[in-house]
């Protein structure tokens, strides 16, 4: 059954529910938080968090004085709106009951059980939310503007992976919500880099293994936390593609990042990690330049498989 709906249909269907829960994935990023907040401002209901939020989201929540519920009781709501989430693993595989999805990841393993879903290939879920609300006649408060713009900025890597659409959406939000760009940048820069994260970045750099594919550099490492930030750090300091693992018992969680030049060469991290995830009975996916993977296995073997797949692409001639 095709339960895909248009933006207008999604909006109309959601108005039929009086008490929705806008549920964000674990370690929720600003795209998830900002999107959930803006939807809650329009439709009412509550914002739910699985486990935790990341450091920028924590700053955003405090800045906008958001009321969020950690590990909420799903049964108290007439529908759960799963925001910016592509796999059940990101929700710790909790039982959702009646749910729908709004997401920008084109690969999503939760569609079959959803009542309806709105999936668009955009650089952030915030862009989908903004477009939907604008098309249905809603204005944007200053708080909604800050929330959505922060989500777009962080999910595009401070516009490194931006499209014309994401830039247009940001510009229109700045104008409509009367938010200054400097105000959002100040929020981002005021987010403290706690010492545990700084130590994790140094450990990731210290443990890095480098593989060359002609002039391309693929870096792998491992940390006990902050693997997404560590993967970004390795690209920022010179890698073309990075994979950083975090062992969790028998499971290994991997975050990956790629430079635009590697993407243009043919690297599609979301597709690569999705295929590796399926091959190992786990889950994986994301975008061309940023993706994640969770499987049961040995971290070194999984990292080696990731590198092998990327190397094969980078060494192809005349793509």
Image (spheres, rainbow, N blue to C red):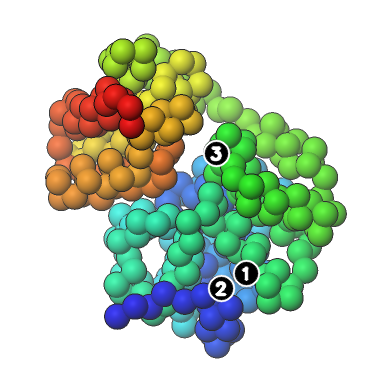
Residue at the bottom extreme, as displayed: 16
Residue at the front extreme, as displayed: 318
**Residue 63: where, in percent of width, then height?**
72, 48
From the viewer's perspective, tell me whether residue 239 is left or right of residue 126. left
Picture quadrant where residue 141 is located: bottom right
The kind of secondary structure element at disc 1 is helix
**Residue 131: where, in percent of width, then height?**
64, 65
Name the residue beneath numbered marker 1.
132
- Residue at 81% in and 59% down: 176
CA distance separating discs 2 and 1 = 5 Å
Pointer 3 with pointer 1, Cβ within 8 A: no
Is residue 201 visible in this depiction of the protein? Answer: yes
From the viewer's perspective, tell me whether residue 146 is left or right of residue 83. right
Name the residue beneath numbered marker 2.
7
- Residue at 41% in and 19% down: 239
Query: Residue 161: which disc?
Result: 3
Q: Earlier in the sequence, mark 3 or mark 2?
A: 2
Is residue 230 visible in this depiction of the protein? Answer: no
The kind of secondary structure element at disc 3 is loop
């Amino acid at each position: 059954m095709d339960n895909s709906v248009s933006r207008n249909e999604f909006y109309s269907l959601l108005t039929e529910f009086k008490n929705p829960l806008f549920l964000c994935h674990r370690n929720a990023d600003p795209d998830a938080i900002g999107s959930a907040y803006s939807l809650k401002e329009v439709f009412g209901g509550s914002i739910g968090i699985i486990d935790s939020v990341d450091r920028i989201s924590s700053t955003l929540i405090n800045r906008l004085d958001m009321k969020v519920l950690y590990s909420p009781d799903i049964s108290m709501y007439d529908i759960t709106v799963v925001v910016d989430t592509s796999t059940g693993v990101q929700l710790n595989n909790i039982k959702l009951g009646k749910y729908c999805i709004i997401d920008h990841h084109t690969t999503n393993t939760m569609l079959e059980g959803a009542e309806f879903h709105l999936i668009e290939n955009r650089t952030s879920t915030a862009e989908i939310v903004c477009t939907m609300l604008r098309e249905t006649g809603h204005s944007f408060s200053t708080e909604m503007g800050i929330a959505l713009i922060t989500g777009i900025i962080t999910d595009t890597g401070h516009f490194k992976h931006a499209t014309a659409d994401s830039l247009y959406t940001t510009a229109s939000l700045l104008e409509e919500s009367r938010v200054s760009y400097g105000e959002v940048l100040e929020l981002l820069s005021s987010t403290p880099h706690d010492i545990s994260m700084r130590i994790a970045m140094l450990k990731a750099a210290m443990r890095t293994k480098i593989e060359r594919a002609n002039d391309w550099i693929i870096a792998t490492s491992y940390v006990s936390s902050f693997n997404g930030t560590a993967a970004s750090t390795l690209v920022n300091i010179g890698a073309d593609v990075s994979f950083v693992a975090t062992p969790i018992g028998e499971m290994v969680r991997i975050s990956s990042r790629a430079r635009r030049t590697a993407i243009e060469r043919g690297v599609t991290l979301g597709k690569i990690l999705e295929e590796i995830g399926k091959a190992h009975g786990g889950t994986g996916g994301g975008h061309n330049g940023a993706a994640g993977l969770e499987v049961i296995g040995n971290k070194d073997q999984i990292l080696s498989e990731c590198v092998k797949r990327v190397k094969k692409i980078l060494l192809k001639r005349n793509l």
